[in-house]
Image: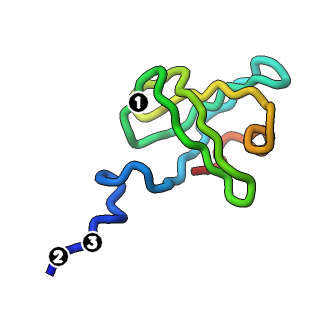
Amino acid sequence: MSTCSCHDKEKHSLLPAAYRIISITRHTPQEWNFRVEVDFPARWGQFVEVSLPCVGEAPISVSDCGEGWIDLLIRNVGKVTGALFTLHEGCVFS
């Protein structure tokens, strides 16, 4: 009998996962940097699909990264980014 591995996050990085906001830096009223705790390696130029339940999802580019974190520089221009701007440090999103 085989074992199902469809929920193994290591093998299926496209499955949603929850990530915590470490810090928020407000550069302008419409442009904020979100530092997010992650458990995967990232590089500049890659993107993550940010998903908020009952709101939607948006691709956001990684603007900086380090061991265990990524930065997402986000401009508030729509439904998903507007909802992100209501979150605070310590909040979790997928």
Please identify the quarter of the rendering in which residue 24 is found.
top right
Please identify the quarter of the rendering in which residue 20 is found.
top right
- Disc 1 element: loop
In percent of the image, x 60 and y 44: which residue is there?
50
Q: CA distance from mark 2 to mark 1?
A: 32 Å
Q: Do the numbered discs 3 and 1 sit on residues whose CB atoms are within 8 Å?
A: no
> What residue does disc 1 label?
42
Q: Do the numbered discs 3 and 2 sit on residues whose CB atoms are within 8 Å?
A: yes
The answer to whether residue 4 is left or right of residue 27 is left
> What residue does disc 3 label?
4
Front position in the image: 86 or 23: 86
In percent of the image, x 28 and y 65: which residue is there?
5
Front position in the image: 38 or 10: 10
Give the class, few, some or many, for how many residues have Cα within 10 Å of label 1's Cα (few <14, many ≥20): some
> What residue does disc 2 label?
2
User: What residue type is disc 3 on?
Assistant: Cys
- Disc 2 element: loop
- Disc 3 element: loop
User: What residue type is disc 1 on?
Assistant: Ala
The first of marks 3 and 1 along the sequence is: 3
The answer to whether residue 71 is left or right of residue 30 is left
Q: Position of residue 66 (x, y in %)?
A: 43, 25
User: What residue type is disc 2 on?
Assistant: Ser
Give the class, few, some or many, for how many residues have Cα within 10 Å of label 2's Cα (few <14, many ≥20): few
Q: Is residue 36 above or below residue 92?
A: above
Q: Is residue 85 above or below residue 46?
A: below
